[in-house]
Every structure is written in structure tokens, then in C-alpha cells.
Image (cartoon, helix red, strand yellow):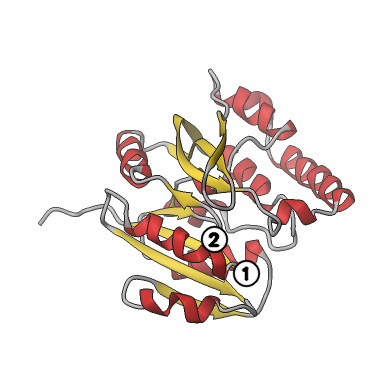
């Protein structure tokens, strides 16, 4: 019997009922078929639960009290049964070959702890407004040093081995902002990154985006704390 690698796609959502169907459909329409869709409703007060009832046979749906993105993603990770984890924000969408292309790279490179790609910035109606080309580096040390100053990795573009997260640990729930930045640095302290220089995701820009509600003072404070913690744990000169 041939084992087909399974991917868990974790979708945290909070009051994103107007976008969630596009998000779920983008996973259902993937060319790679062995996946599970885990939707974590982080205490939504809109009609999200009602809207996604039509997907009851295609998703795993869990409702929890509001705890923020880290809490919702961690809840999803604990429910995941896949070999690899992908995170998809509820207002974003995967392009059709996202999973197929990434899993092919992962199977060839067993030492990869995090894979990411370029993406399109799109309007609320999913019309492309900008191509965002991410960053690739000649060495892993260079990638980590640059990451310390600029979080160039879009969460919805990532694929991570479940075993890597089991080893490194979950998102740090004390961070309301930059929780992804913290996880990327912790993964990078033990594993290599892989960059795919093509867009695999469409990321929406709209009035509900968390980044439009960011407290800049808290963001700066979190960034400083994360950098201090990672610098105390790893020697960048050895990476």
C-alpha cells in the first residue's frame, strides 16, 4: 500500500463570514487532494457558523472562545493529523497548485523546517493590486539575520512539517502581534528555510485586516522582546 502524504490546512477565523467561503473553496479546489481543512472559529459573533454549514462534510469545524490568532492556530495544530501544516488566514486564498508544488519540494528536502513563497496582494473582490516578491538568500544564516530585522514571510504562504512544530513548540500565545515572527525565528534556529519564487497565495487588503488595527507601541515592544529571547537562545554565528 502506497502512503500518500497528508496536509492539514488550518484556518483561524474571527468575524470573517463574508470571506470564509472563498478561503475554504480555494483549498477544496487544490490539485493536491490529500488534505484536511480545520476551521477554528475564534469566538465569531457574525454569521460564520451558519455560512459554513454547507461545508460540514468537507471540513472539521471547531468553535472556541476568542483568544487571538496564536490561540486559534495552536488549537488547530492540536487537532491536526497531517504530516505537514499549512496556515491560511480566513480572508486569504490559496492558488490551485499551492499544496502540490510545496509538497513536491518538501519530499525532496527532508531538512526543511519552513517553506514560504511570493504572493499577490488583492482587493476585497480578489482583484490583483500588487505582486509581492519575497526574499531568498544564499545562506541560512543570512536568512535569519535578515528576518531579525524584517518579517518577510507571509503566514498564508507557509508549509511546515508537523514534526518540526512538535519539536520547536507552538505559537507563543503571550504575543498578540508578531506571533508568526517569533515562530519563524524559533524554527530557523533548528531547521532550514525553503523559498519558492512564485506566488502561491492571494492576500486580501481590506478594512477588517488586523494590521490596520495594530498598536504600534505594542508591536515594537513585542519585536524587541522576541529578538532578545532568540538572541539569548541561539548563536547566530553558528547558523
Q: In the rendered view of the protein, which quadrant contains the N terminus?
A: bottom left
Tell me residue 178's x, y (percent). 71, 50
User: In the rendered image, which residue does mark 1 sit on?
Assistant: 14
Q: In the rendered view of the protein, which quadrant contains the C terminus?
A: top right
- Secondary structure, mark 2, is loop
Can residue 239 be seen here? The reply is no
Q: Nearer the viewer, residue 105 or 51?
A: 51
Structural crowding at the residue carrying mark 1, measured as other residues with C-alpha within 10 Å and reported as few (<14), some (14–19) or many (≥20): many
Query: Residue 90 bears which disc, if any?
Result: 2
In the rendered view, does 99 fall on the left or right side of 76?
left
Asked which quadrant contains residue 97, the reply is: top left
- Secondary structure, mark 1, is loop
Tell me residue 88's x, y (percent). 50, 55
Rounded to the nearest whole Å, what is the CA distance between mark 1 and mark 2? 8 Å
Q: Which of 51 and 149 is in front in this view?
A: 51
In the rendered view, does 212 fall on the left or right side of 153?
right
Tell me residue 57's x, y (percent). 31, 76
Is there a contact, CB below 8 Å, between mark 1 and mark 2?
yes
Asked which quadrant contains residue 79, the reply is: bottom left
- The residue shown at (63%, 71%) is 15
- In the rendered image, the residue lying farthest to the right is 217
In the rendered view, does 114 fall on the left or right side of 57?
right
Tell me residue 8's x, y (percent). 39, 59
- The residue shown at (62%, 78%) is 46
Amino acid at each position: 500500500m502506497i502512503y500518500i502524504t497528508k496536509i492539514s490546512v488550518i484556518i483561524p477565523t474571527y468575524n470573517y463570514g463574508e470571506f470564509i467561503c472563498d478561503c475554504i473553496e480555494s483549498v477544496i479546489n487544490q490539485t493536491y487532494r490529500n488534505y484536511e481543512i480545520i476551521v477554528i472559529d475564534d469566538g465569531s459573533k457574525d454569521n460564520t457558523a451558519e455560512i459554513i454549514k454547507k461545508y460540514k462534510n468537507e471540513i472539521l469545524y471547531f468553535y472556541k472562545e476568542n483568544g487571538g490568532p496564536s490561540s486559534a492556530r495552536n488549537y488547530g495544530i492540536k487537532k491536526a493529523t497531517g504530516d505537514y501544516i499549512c496556515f491560511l488566514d480566513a480572508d486569504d486564498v490559496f492558488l490551485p497548485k499551492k499544496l502540490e508544488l510545496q509538497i513536491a519540494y518538501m519530499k525532496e528536502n527532508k531538512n526543511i523546517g519552513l517553506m514560504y513563497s511570493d504572493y499577490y496582494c488583492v482587493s476585497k473582490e480578489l482583484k490583483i493590486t500588487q505582486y509581492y516578491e519575497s526574499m531568498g538568500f544564499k545562506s541560512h544564516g543570512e536568512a535569519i539575520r535578515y528576518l531579525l530585522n524584517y518579517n518577510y514571510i507571509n503566514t498564508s504562504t507557509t508549509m511546515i512539517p508537523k514534526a518540526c512544530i512538535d519539536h520547536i513548540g507552538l505559537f507563543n500565545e503571550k504575543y498578540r502581534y508578531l506571533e508568526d515572527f517569533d515562530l519563524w525565528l524559533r524554527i530557523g534556529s533548528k531547521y532550514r528555510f525553503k523559498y519558492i519564487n512564485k506566488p502561491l497565495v492571494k492576500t486580501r487588503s481590506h478594512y477588517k485586516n488586523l494590521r490596520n488595527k495594530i498598536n504600534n507601541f505594542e508591536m515594537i515592544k513585542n519585536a524587541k522582546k522576541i529578538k532578545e529571547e532568540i538572541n539569548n537562545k541561539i548563536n547566530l554565528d553558528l547558523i
